[in-house]
Image (spheres, rainbow, N blue to C red):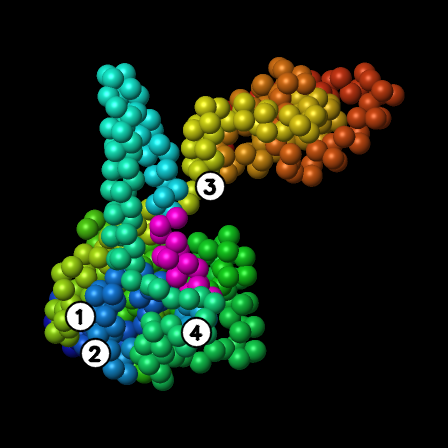
Amino acid sequence: MPNSPRAKKTTKATAERSTFRTEFAGYYPPTDDDLRHFVTDGLVVLDTNAVLDLYRFTDTTREEYFAALELLGERLWIPNRVGEEFHDRRASVIADRQGIRDVIAAQMAKPIAELVAIAAHHAHRHGLDQEVADAVRDGVHAAVDTLIREIEGTVGITIDLDAHPDSDPILTQLGELFDGKIGAAFGDKEAAAAHKEHEIRHAGHVPPGYADGRKGERAIGDFLVWKQTINEASSRGLPVLLVTNETKPDWVFSDGHYTMPRVELVREMKKQADCEFHLVDVQTYLGLAQKYLAAQVSDAAVDEAADLRRALAAVTFDHGAGFRQGVAAAGLDSISYFRQAAAAANFDPGEEVRQALAAGNFDPGAYFRQAFATAWVDPGAYLRQALAEPGSDPAPKALPPQKKKAARPTAKKSSTAKKAAPTAKKSATAKKPATGDKPAE
């Protein structure tokens, strides 16, 4: 009944309430008008990494970033949790930047030594004077030193961490920038409620923050930033633009060429504060400030922010990959590594495993998956070697405590030998599916 008054009234009310796009706004990248609205009218919130970038940039880019933030006036804001995390991490970021010479020198020491040795070898082989070889060596060291000094010059940080914080010019400028623009910390009741809510959300993988499970007590950090931001948005009634370099899946998702906030975050901000939400990285914010705020931001500053983000992403450490690379560099396979590493402990895992299997209370697949998960060792292959080579397969010194529990039933085995033997056979058979298991990721 398309012509009925009731149908028309319902359609009109629905149109006034929402459109297809606004109802599912989290699935659409913002338009240019949307971005302009966020930057010129919205509450711009800085995440901890976006604040710490002020210590990572060169002097020129830092000043342009400061200027682009100052243009926001009272619309610039940071959650109290961001302030805490910034002060906790400030010293380590400064130390990392100022220690760049040691880092580069350590990484280049071996290749430089090899290059100098090759040059000296060929100089000697072709009868060249030793002075020629020495000149090559000195030239290499001089060139590297020049490179390091140039890189040090881009760091732009000469802050004495042992001195009073007031002697830090960047910290002083940050204090002036954020004066009166910091959220209040949660009281005891709010904090307790937030911890309880975080536990529930973390268990249900509700963003943000569930990807920080390994951070222990600090795992709640992202959720507190989010919760405090929602509260501020509710009181201000402004669209929220979060400036963050986060790439974890509990904050963002990628849809083709676009990286956008998780749909759940957009929905929650709308539901709790009745405000639109979007997030961008520092590089994108500088570009938006250049475009919509007439900020004096150079293309070089935007490029530097992009380079910095890529560099920080590249140093995210994968313990499993790091272990495998270290073992490979030593010319060992993982099994050989564990044999050699625990040889001094005079430990025979082959015998330990056989006793545990005989006791009938041991899951070898789970045991070895847990023990070698970070190293990506094949537990099946390790177990086969352990059983096939008694006494020759020492394992890591740090093993799960299960091995101690398994040793006790072995003493009772002698009085029930006939019963124990079938048990061992059954357990040995049960382990077969585990040998094909892939290590946990």
- Dots 2, 1 in contact, CB < 8 A: yes
Structural distance between the alpha carbons of marks 3 and 4: 34 Å
Of residue 11 and residue 364, the one placed in the foreground of this image is 364
Q: Which residue is mark 2?
A: 71
| Residue 10 on the magenta segment | no
Task: Describe residue 50's horizontal placement relative to residue 213 as left or right.
Answer: left
Task: Compare marks 2 and 3 and give the one earlier in the sequence.
Answer: 2
Task: Compare marks 3 and 1 and give the one earlier in the sequence.
Answer: 1
Give the label, 4 or 2, closer to the camera: 4
* Count of residue discs: 4
Residue 414: x and y in percent read: 85, 20
Q: Kindly tell me whether residue 21 is visible in this rendering.
A: no
- Dots 4, 2 in contact, CB < 8 A: no
The N terminus appears in which quarter of the rendering?
bottom left
Task: Compare marks 3 and 4 and give the one earlier in the sequence.
Answer: 4
Q: Which residue is mark 1?
A: 289
Q: Amino acid at mark 3?
A: His
Residue 252: x and y in percent read: 32, 56
As helix, strand or loop, the secondary structure at mark 2 comes to loop
Q: Residue at x 47, y 78 (%)?
A: 185
Q: Residue at x 35, y 50 (%)?
A: 101
Residue 408: x and y in percent read: 80, 32
As helix, strand or loop, the secondary structure at mark 4 comes to helix
Q: Which residue is mark 3?
A: 319
